[in-house]
């Protein structure tokens, strides 16, 4: 029998959790004070869809805005970063809807933004003249979660159709697109050759 396991060495406790929670909160407050009047949460982030078929109905905050979104909003990469906008040069826009939504976020942000002059009293181009209304927000512009679809009864029309058959047909169409195109071209060439022979 194995009695000498020395299990006490491998027990992990978490007695410091409440103190750690308090410490994290205090650190957030210190950071917010240090970056004031900038937002405490950091840079402005875009709305992106989660990857994979399972999660793509959900939206979340992304790493940064794509270069095309920044350009559409009338900014450059460096000017956007200097205004507290996160930029991700690797991101590609594959959805027109998300692209337009993120451009709209950037335009709204620019309209609400108050840019402090670097030196008090010396207002340069792009700086805000009146900075008295500046307040610190916890989040820059929170990401609105996509509303969840409520459960509903299946309609009679939906009962008639078979989703399995429909998907199988679409898969078959996608697989045979090249073969069908080739056979179509072959028939056209044969018809053209036959017309030439008749002449």
Image (cartoon, rainbow, N blue to C red):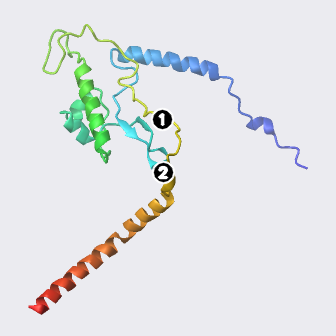
Relative placement, left or right, of 17 versus 109 is right
Decide: is 43 above or below 63. above
Relative vertical location of residue 34 with respect to residue 195 in this rendering, above or below: above
Report if residue 63 is visible in the image. Answer: no
Which badge, 1 or 2, is on the more N-terminal residue? 1
Q: Please give left or right for residue 2 compared with residue 49 in the image.
A: right
Q: How packed is label 2: few (under 14 Cα within 10 Å), some, or many (20 or more)? A: few
- The residue to which callout 1 is attached is 148
Which label was assigned to residue 158? 2
Name the residue rendered at 26%, 19% in the picture: 112
Residue 198: image location, x then y, percent = 12, 91
User: Residue most toward the top?
Assistant: 132
Q: Quadrant of residue 98?
A: top left
Q: How many marks?
A: 2
Q: In the picture shown, does residue 156 fall above or below 23?
A: below
- The CA span between labels 1 and 2 is 21 Å
Residue 194 versus residue 94: which sits nearer the camera?
194
Identify the image quadrant of the C terminus.
Answer: bottom left
Residue at the left extreme, as displayed:
199
Q: Quadrant of residue 50?
A: top left
Q: Residue at x 27, y 9 (%)?
A: 133
| CB within 8 Å, label 1 to label 2 | no
Residue 171 lies, in percent from the top left, at 42, 64
Residue with the most extreme front position: 156
Q: Position of residue 12 (x, y in %)?
A: 71, 33
Q: Which one is nearer the viewer's eye here, 140 or 25?
A: 140
Secondary structure found at label 2: helix
**Is residue 69 or residue 197 the one in the foreground?**
197
């Amino acid at each position: 029998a194995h009695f000498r396991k020395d299990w006490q060495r491998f027990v992990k406790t978490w007695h410091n959790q409440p103190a750690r929670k308090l410490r994290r909160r205090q650190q957030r407050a210190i950071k917010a004070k240090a970056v004031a009047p900038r937002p405490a949460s950091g840079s402005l982030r875009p709305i992106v869809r989660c990857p994979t078929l399972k999660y793509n109905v959900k939206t979340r905050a992304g790493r940064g805005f794509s270069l095309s979104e920044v350009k559409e909003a009338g900014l450059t990469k460096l000017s956007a970063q200097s205004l507290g906008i996160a930029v991700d040069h690797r991101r590609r826009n594959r959805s027109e809807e998300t692209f337009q939504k993120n451009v709209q976020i950037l335009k709204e942000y620019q309209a609400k933004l108050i840019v402090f002059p670097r030196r008090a009293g010396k207002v340069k181009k792009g700086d805000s003249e009146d900075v008295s209304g500046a307040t610190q927000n916890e989040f820059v512009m929170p990401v609105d979660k996509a509303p969840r679809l409520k459960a509903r009864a299946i309609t009679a029309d939906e009962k008639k159709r078979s989703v399995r058959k429909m998907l199988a047909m679409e898969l078959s169409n996608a697989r045979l697109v090249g073969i069908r195109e080739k056979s179509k071209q072959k028939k056209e060439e044969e018809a053209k050759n036959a017309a030439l022979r008749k002449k």
